[in-house]
Amino acid sequence: MRKYILSILILLLIATIGCAPTAVEKTKEGYLNPKDAGAYNHRGIAYDEKGQHDKAIADFAKAIELNPKYAEAYSNRGIAYGEKGQFDQAISDHSKAIEINPRLAGAYYNRGNVYKDKGQYDKAISDYSKAIELNPKYADGYNNRGNAYDEKGQYDKAIADYTKAIEITPKFAEAYNNRGDAYAEKGQYDKAIYDYSKVIELNPKDSDAYNNRGLVLSYKGDYDQSIADFTKAIEINPNLASAYNNRAVACYIKGEYDKVWDDVRKAQSLGFQVHPEFLKALREDPGKQK
């Protein structure tokens, strides 16, 4: 009798499992309720993270169709449009999200990113500032507003924002790197080196941080250490064209001419435009032609 009852229960369980898909759509990502706006929104995010922007846009559009007041779905679709370079559509969607929910800090932040990509830095700064007003702990908001200030050449304001981002998120490697760039632009090389070193501490595989630190060390005349940093950057990322160019320049200044042309040619093969004056000096100076 026990075996009989157990068999009946197993059959019922199988029958239940077999009936599960009737209320949902089977997709490659799993089961999706065709009337669940949130499910489409979440799947859209997954598509967007995979770089499948058109599929993401379709899912966000379906979420909006099901829930026309879904502010987050509008802003998410705006992100996908922005990643496709369709900036006007992106701004329209972020603006609609803000119209629906004026306190949605992420929508202001996202629209600010689009304005920054369009080179409209004042509008970007305004949106980042609103996002920060709504969410004073918005580290990304401070970081990206810093980027907009940096593009305008307002390095002190940029540094202040990067510093605030780091204060909120002490392991924010990107903010350290950006602040290092701003310090370098101001000629404050020791501070820049500190920040690039912090990036490397947080992420030892960051080839750009080694390349950037190498550049600043070159500006300070420390060519041996700068060459070591360029070499490390290349070791991490063999396709980092600028690092080959930078190492070539440092070797040239040191008089290590036998190493220069190989790096120049490698940089060029990777699409880097080597400065014509540097090439002219290499070709004209005795003992440096190849």
Image (cartoon, rainbow, N blue to C red):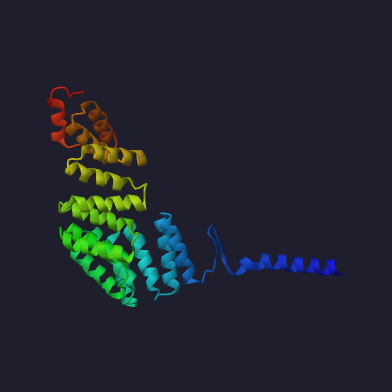
Residue pushed farthest right?
A: 1
The vertical placement of 142 against 84, above or below, is below
Q: Nearer the viewer, residue 66 or 230?
A: 230
Q: Which quadrant, please, contains the C terminus?
A: top left
Total residue callouts: 0
The image quarter in which residue 16 lies: bottom right
The image quarter in which residue 31 lies: bottom right
From the viewer's perspective, tell me whether residue 26 is left or right of residue 9: left
Residue 195: percent from the left, percent from the top? 26, 53
Q: Nearer the viewer, residue 100 or 286?
A: 286
From the viewer's perspective, tell me whether residue 247 is left or right of residue 232: left
Residue 80: percent from the left, percent from the top? 36, 60
The vertical placement of 157 against 133, above or below, is above
Residue 14: percent from the left, percent from the top? 71, 65
Residue 128: percent from the left, percent from the top? 26, 68
For image coordinates 35% across by 38% down, the residue present is 235
Q: Nearer the viewer, residue 122 or 210?
A: 210
Using the rendered image of the protein, determine whether residue 147 is visible from the camera's viewpoint. yes
For image coordinates 17% across by 43% down, the residue present is 219
The image quarter in which residue 237 lies: top left
Using the rendered image of the protein, determine whether residue 115 is visible from the camera's viewpoint. no
Q: Which quadrant, please, contains the N terminus?
A: bottom right
For image coordinates 54% across by 57% down, the residue present is 28
